[in-house]
Image: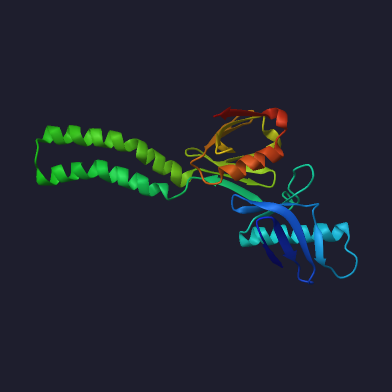
Amino acid sequence: MKVTGTKGYVQVEDDNGNIARFDGEVCLGSFYAYADSVRWIRHAGEATDQDRLDLIYQATRYGKNCGEKVLFFDDDGKVLFETELGLKTEVYWSKSYLVIVAVAVFTLVFPVVLITVLDLVSLMFSIVFASVSVLLASPFLVWAFQIWRFRVTAEGAIVTVRPTAGRKYTFSADEVTRIIRKTKTDSGWEMIKKVTIYTKTRHVSLNDNMTGIEDMDAYFLRHTDPDKIITKKRK
C-alpha cells in the first residue's frame, strides 16, 4: 500500500498495482477525501464500486496504522469505515505546557528557598512568605495535574473521558443530548474556541488550548443530530 498526494487530492496504490485518486483537501494534519470522487489511474480490468470501497478501506487502515490519517467522506458527511476500523480521535493538553508550569512554580518557590537558606528575615516572615508563595503556586500545580491526566478519546462510536480527577468513563456518541460550540471568526475563518458535550448524566468541556480540539469538534459534528448542536459565534 502506498498513499501520496497533494493539497488537492490523495493518490492510493494497492499491493496489486491498482492506482486511484480522490479529490479532497488537507485539514489540520489529516487529509479529508471525497469517497465518490474516484479517478482510476490504473486498474487491472474494469473497476467496480466494490473495488473503490476496498481501496478506501485499505487506505484508511494504512493511515491508521502509520499515524497518517486519511478520512474518506460519503455524500452524507459520514466517514467510511470509521466504526469498523475503530478510528481514533483524541483531545489532550500538550505536555509542552508543563514547561510554563515549571517556570512559574520555580519563580514563586526559589525566593522562599533563597531567603530560608540565607536566613535574611525572621522566622515568622519566612513562614508567611512561604505560605503566600505556595498559595500562588497551587493553581499552577493543579493545572500541571490536569495537563498530565486529562484526555478525551473517540474511537468508532465510543467516547472515553479520562477526567482530571475521578475515574475514567465512556459513553456512546448516540447518548449526546446537547453540544454547545463557541466559535470566533478570524481572517475569514471560523475558529473553534470551546466545545461542551452533554449527556444525560455528565458533561465535558474542551477549549482551544488543547491539542486535537478541531478534530474532536469535527467528530461530534459528524456523529450528532444537528438539532442538538448550538453554535455561538463571536466576532
Quarter of the figure that contains the N terminus: bottom right
Q: Is residue 173 visible?
A: yes
Image x and y of residue 96, in percent? 42, 50
Q: Quadrant of residue 139?
A: top left
Q: Is residue 32 visible?
A: no
Foreground: 186 or 80? 186
Quarter of the figure that contains the C terminus: top right
Image x and y of residue 5, in percent? 68, 62
- Above or below, 104 against 33 in this view is above
Q: Residue at x 86, y 58 (%)?
A: 50
Image x and y of residue 175, in percent? 68, 34
- Above or below, 93 against 65 in this view is above
Q: Quadrant of residue 183?
A: top right
Image x and y of residue 226, in percent? 71, 31
- Above or below, 229 against 115 in this view is above
Left/right placement of residue 100 relative to residue 83 reads left
Left/right placement of residue 118 relative to residue 131 reads left
Q: Residue at x 71, y 28 (%)?
A: 227
Q: Residue at x 69, y 47 (%)?
A: 156
